[in-house]
Each structure stands twice: as structure tokens, then as C-alpha cells.
Image (cartoon, rainbow, N blue to C red):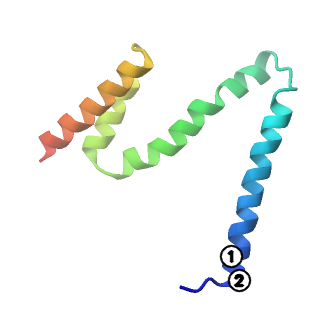
Amino acid sequence: MTVDPATLAAILAMAAATWLTRIAGFLIGGRLVLRGRAKAAFDAIPPAVLVAVIAPSALATGWPETAAAAVTVVAATRLPLLATVAVGVAAVVALRALAG
């Protein structure tokens, strides 16, 4: 297997950019004092990333996965995290079995 030098350079540059971004966030994040809207914005980042990762696959795979995602969203508004995960897994298994 041969690796094109341009491809290797691109991979190494992306790895360096990712590493530097993570390290900068770690070093700078502890020094930030956030209040009000800035704190609310930072608190919204993890759920937003999670939705950005899950939504495309939930919507592109089929109706059982889309319906299970909707059931899980409703469960998340009422249940703790572990129960929500259990409901989501059970919903996707049941709906996939129902779909055949």
C-alpha cells in the first residue's frame, strides 16, 4: 500500500489541528469565568454536538430508527440518562423487529 505524500501531509495537518484545538481548550477553558448567556451557551455545546452526530444517522437509516429517536427524545424529557438509553435501545429493537 502506498500513501500519496499530499494525502499524508493533509492527514498530519488535520491531526495537528485537532490536537492543538483540544489542548488549547483544555488550557484556556479552566481560566474562563463565564456568566449569564455565555455560560448558557457553553452548557448547550455537549447536547448540540450529540444531536449533530446522532440526527443524520437517525433520519437517514429508516423509519424504525427515526421513530426510536423520537421516542428517546420524549423519554429524555422525563427520565434520567440511564433509563433514557434503555428506552431508546428497547424502542429501536422493537421497531426494527416490527418492521421485519
For the residue pair 22 and 60, the one nearer the viewer reads as 22
Query: Given the current orientation, which residue lies at the most extreme front position?
Result: 1
Instruction: Please state which amino acid type lies under the numbered disc 2.
Output: Pro
Residue at image location 71% in from the left, 71% down from the top: 10
Q: Is residue 69 above or below residue 32?
A: below
Residue 90, percent from left and from top: 25, 30
Callout 1: helix, strand or loop?
helix
In this picture, residue 63 sits left or right of residue 42: left
Q: Amino acid at mark 1?
A: Leu
Does 92 sit above or below residue 19?
above
Of 88 and 36, the residue lying toward us: 88
**Contact (Cβ within 8 Å) of mark 1 with mark 2:** yes
Is 58 located above or below residue 41 in the figure? below
Disc 1 versus disc 2: distance between alpha carbons? 5 Å
Q: Nearer the viewer, residue 7 or 58?
A: 7
Place residue 83 in its image quadrant: top left
Quarter holding residue 35? top right
Mark 1 = which residue? 8
Q: Please tell me which residue lies in front, 40 or 29.
A: 29
Q: Which residue is mark 2?
A: 5
In the rendered image, residue 50, in percent from the top left (x then y), is placed at 53, 37
